[in-house]
Image (spheres, coloured by chain):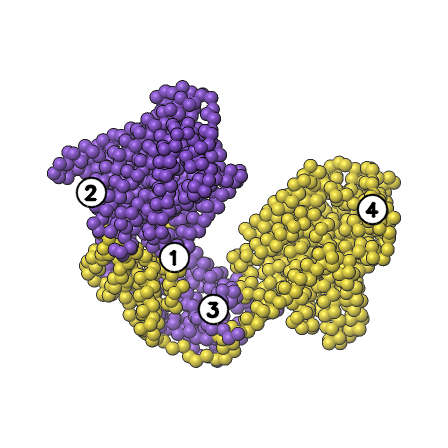
Chain colours: A yellow, B purple
Amino acid sequence: MTVPGAGKERDRLTVPQGLAALSLDALASVAYGPEAIVLVLAAAGSQGLGYTLPVTVAIVILLAALTFSYRQVIAAFPNGGGAYAVAGRHLGRRVSLIAAASLIIDYVLNVAVSVSAGVAALTSAFPSLYGDRVWICVLVLALITGVNLYGVAESAKVLILPTVVFVVAVFTVITVGLLRAHPVTEPTHVGPATETVGLLLLLKAFASGCAALTGVEAIANAVPTFRTPRVQRAQHTEIALGGLLGAMLIGLSVLIGRFRVAPNSTKTVLAQLTEASLGHNAGFYLVQFSTMALLALAANTSFGGMPVLTSLLARDHHVPHVFALRADRQVYRHGVLVLAGAALVLLVGARGDTQALVPVFAIGVFIGFTISQVGMVRHWHLERGAGWQGRALLNGVGAVLTAAATVIELIAKFSKGGWLVFLAVAVLVLLFESIHRAYQRIGRALHIGEVPGPPQERHSLVIVPVSSVNRLTQEALATALSLGDEVRAVTVAYPDDEGMPSAEPMRQAWAQWQPHVPLTVLTSPSRSLTRPIVDYLRTLEATVEHDRLVVLIPETHLPRPWQRLLQNQRGILLDHAIRQHTDVLICRLRFRLTVPR
Amino acid sequence: MTVPGAGKERDRLTVPQGLAALSLDALASVAYGPEAIVLVLAAAGSQGLGYTLPVTVAIVILLAALTFSYRQVIAAFPNGGGAYAVAGRHLGRRVSLIAAASLIIDYVLNVAVSVSAGVAALTSAFPSLYGDRVWICVLVLALITGVNLYGVAESAKVLILPTVVFVVAVFTVITVGLLRAHPVTEPTHVGPATETVGLLLLLKAFASGCAALTGVEAIANAVPTFRTPRVQRAQHTEIALGGLLGAMLIGLSVLIGRFRVAPNSTKTVLAQLTEASLGHNAGFYLVQFSTMALLALAANTSFGGMPVLTSLLARDHHVPHVFALRADRQVYRHGVLVLAGAALVLLVGARGDTQALVPVFAIGVFIGFTISQVGMVRHWHLERGAGWQGRALLNGVGAVLTAAATVIELIAKFSKGGWLVFLAVAVLVLLFESIHRAYQRIGRALHIGEVPGPPQERHSLVIVPVSSVNRLTQEALATALSLGDEVRAVTVAYPDDEGMPSAEPMRQAWAQWQPHVPLTVLTSPSRSLTRPIVDYLRTLEATVEHDRLVVLIPETHLPRPWQRLLQNQRGILLDHAIRQHTDVLICRLRFRLTVPR
């Protein structure tokens, strides 16, 4: 995965690379955005569908406002602002946490929506697959997850081709469609009107369509990943994104009106438009495949964005600190699995139906939009640089519009799962805060900030469990003697065939060896290794509390895994048991052994 | 679980307790043994069923021979012989391994057969459950497994009641049935004859019926668990078992002839006999329930027997040594899960049909029988004690009969899954031998048996990764100083908001503290904790190869598990990475911290 801030200068992004790496999820959203509008308007029959263009225009105006606002965010927060950083600086912790929560929810929703939309593009090309779309979704998700788990370092260059192909394809569909007088294929029949065109319906359509704007904030979040001059490059990318996205949305909505396209459960609107303008031919399949590919990549961007956000949260003690170590594979993998798991739940819950997920999608995004715009106004107000009023005004307009959009989203979608987003945001914020409090308490307990007394050296007593006299035992005692001021070996005697524990052979071997280390024999009639040793250590802990007690567990480290099954089990058992029942310091000595065949 | 050899004298077994603890699986086998005979003979219609008694008599003769043979095994191997021990002493390792393998397979099959037969008893009482029998089997198995995982220490006393109830119930059925002139219920109609009565058919019936003899060896395997005088008590128990089992088998087969009982897929033969003699009343249900209960307990005995065998195998280096520690919960649990898993596969594979499993069941048992009898002949021959010829003759007869039975089993059942038993035995034996060879190689590599040189003390260098200055750091350095001749602290600096790694705050805190321990700062632009530390340790390993290198990982040990999620992750990551890439000795210091609410 590309981890922003990680790469060297030459690995950083140019404008086209930036479009590919950071904007393809925004661009890909044209695959489901217009459809979301049509789906709502269709309730009012063909008359309703007539309003597709006006609604789209409204959305594009909002897009324009957002684009210019974010152009300013980029300038103001060259270290990658994003709602979380902006709000954190200017609107207080609580608000920044709300922003973070909504962003996390969006990362999850983006995966689910992109995957299902991608599969929808596929099933539009091969309707026979429609019945199994849920399974296909799960498959695709598994694929993306796997790629991320085993970290195929995805460079922005790889992403340019599919992005270009998709954008070109969509524009071809639009231009050809505009030049063509009549659709190649028959338009789908519009169902009977169940509603009349009213303000609420239009607002609903607008709210759903806003899903097409998701992702326009991505560039501002990742300015450091651009090649110098970072700010300018990022700004140009933002403008380019706004322009392309706007043009595609308008173009497609014009075609929708022109070809009287109506929603169809088995064939996406984009697929219908493609058929209507290009006909059902190779071009049609190409568009579907490139859509599918781009949406898969769009889903993938969440896996790149999430770790950046969680590492910021970890640095502010809002999630476990370990998330700050996002470059450690294990950490990263856990994040990937959590993200994939959440997306899986959504996909299966929505039975792979994009339009069931889209409604809730935009809400979180717009909460983020609004917060960062408001934060920007505050920012300019505090800075009061030359012409700050102008900038503040621009962000102000952005804030008002996005706020309005958010409110509309709520009204329109609350019942359609919008409440779920709210619940999720609330839960996450509470979680962040409780974690933060926990860290504060732990910090106090550790007296962080105070200067502790000097570390006091203590007499150290090292206990070495041994089972026979061999090279491993020798190595273990050598190490113990190097570490401890005092060393004792312990061995456990099990019942023999007569059922009587006997340690004679061990005692003799020890006497013969003369390692100058006392050997204590513990008996275990019940054939337990751990119990007698744990009991012994506990009595020691009770008696010699001035010493630093250490138990050194010797283990042979064998080359092959199956060989390890034969040897190291005792060590694991001891480690567990001692860890559970005592405070003794445990050292596991692995003695590398090469075994002749 | 009762772990033979573990308990105190007063916990050891008397004759009745011995019958309950060690023989109930043998007694319980009357629930499926006779049925196995009938099922084969039914192929020749009512004429075939007429041979039930003769076949049973043949089996009981074999039982008598086995009983007396094992009476001698007990005398000869008071420490719990069993086929493995006997063969090991007299027939060489390879043969003893074959015995062990077949025993293990029987433990698994005993679980599967007992569970399915128990469920069959239940479904005979409630035919409506028949359709779901597989699920019920899985449920019962899960129950037994759970009981064993969470180790309800089952004392023999608990087992007496169900055993007595079952035996009394069966004898009641027999006596009442013998006194009654005509069956209470109509006999099931016998299907048309598909075969004529021939030798092969009778042999088949005999082979299947031998499943009723499984478990008669259990007593000889566990002589040490008896109260003194062990041998006599064990011998009396063996005789008692033989007597009871024989009487029940004969009695039931007489009833089968009397009431013309024919096999019925939904109602067990025992259930039919009970109905025919007692009628369909409370008594009928009592018999079914006690059968169900006893079979569940019979399944349970495998969980008690398996660990004893595997611990013997472990002492002889044929399975991982860890199995010798059978009293350690974790070890024991792994065994339980493996046994349960294997039984689950068989149960589901056979769709919970007892009679699909029974054919293969007896084979392994009889291999064991034969091996131990042959071993006994060898034993007497070597001892040549007074009247050894008589004893040798008795075991010889046993050997011949069981060998013959085994051959018959093969001929009759090879195609019916018998080959699977063979494959399994072969695979297990090969596994045991390869493990044995591996241990020999490891032993040579460890120079076991030689006297190693005296352990040499070395200069020790302790590395302590630290992230801030606090009480944990203090504790860690104190411990490091107590252990090491030389101590160094390392800290990892991550990129700040400007993307530049900075360790200034840490450096200052350190300078202020003055712990008289040098602090090394490693930078990690990629935000990885483990990579820089691992690299540092590897360079150290390369440079100071004369020192004993130790890395001390400090961890706070917090009271609540969720708190641990917040803190100890770094330690786990470091441990993993260092373990993977270096040979450094790892010590994880857990510093108990009480966090104020």
Name the foreground residue: B281 vs B33.
B281
Q: CA distance from mark 4 to mark 3?
A: 62 Å
The residue carrying mark 1 is A572
Task: Say if labels 3 and 1 share a chain.
Answer: no
Q: CA distance from mark 3 to mark 1?
A: 23 Å
> Amino acid type of disc 2?
Ala
Q: In which image quadrant can residue A546 be found? A: bottom left
Whether residue B37 is visible to the viewer of this picture, yes or no, is yes
Q: Tell which tag, 2 or 3, sits nearer the viewer.
A: 2
Name the foreground residue: A19 vs B353.
B353
The residue carrying mark 4 is A256
Q: Earlier in the sequence, mark 2 or mark 3?
A: 2
Seen at 39% across and 39% down, the residue is B109
> Amino acid type of disc 1?
Ile
B86 is higher (above) or lower (below) than B588: above
Subunit of label 2: B
Q: Element at badge 1?
A: helix
A421 is higher (above) or lower (below) than B368: below
Q: Tell which tag, 1 or 4, sits nearer the viewer.
A: 1
CA neighbours of label 4 inside 10 A, class few (<14), some (14 to 19), many (20+):
many
